[in-house]
Image (tube, helix red, strand yellow):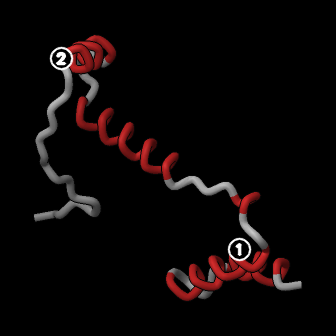
Amino acid sequence: MRRASNPTRKFTISVPGTIFHQLEQLLSYDQSRSAYISAAIAEKMHKDNTVDLKQWSKLELVEELVWRVHKDSPEDVLIQSLLQILTK
């Protein structure tokens, strides 16, 4: 049996009735409530993790990039380039 590369997980949430009814009116019959809610959660999490780099010093940026290179992928050309620029 083929397995999904990103399997889903089922969980139950409670929302106020007004939100539920608004969602029901917003989505058409063939649209997935789960897909809509998953996309909304992902968007919210992305916005919450957005960092304002203008507030960081050069040293903080370099430290973060070094940590990411070590943690993720040392071959990442973009991160390597940014490290070279920032350490000048």
Please determine whether, in this image, residue 66 is positioned above or below residue 11.
below
> How many other residues sit within 10 Å of disc 2, few (<14), some (14-19) or many (≥20)?
few
Which image quarter: residue 41? top left
Drawn side of residue 74 relative to residue 7, left or right: right
Say which of 21 and 15 sits in front.
15
At x 79%, y 74%, the residue is 58
Amino acid type, mark 2: Gly
As drawn, the label of residue 75 is none
Q: Nearer the viewer, residue 38 or 13?
A: 13
Quadrant location, the C terminus: bottom right
Q: Report the front residue among 78 and 48.
A: 48
Q: Quadrant of residue 81?
A: bottom right
Which residue in the structure is indicated by mark 1?
61
| 84 with respect to 75 (left or right) | right
Which corner quadrant holds the N terminus?
bottom left
According to the picture, the residue beneath numbered tag 2 turns out to be 17
Q: Given the current orientation, which residue lies at the most extreme right position?
A: 88
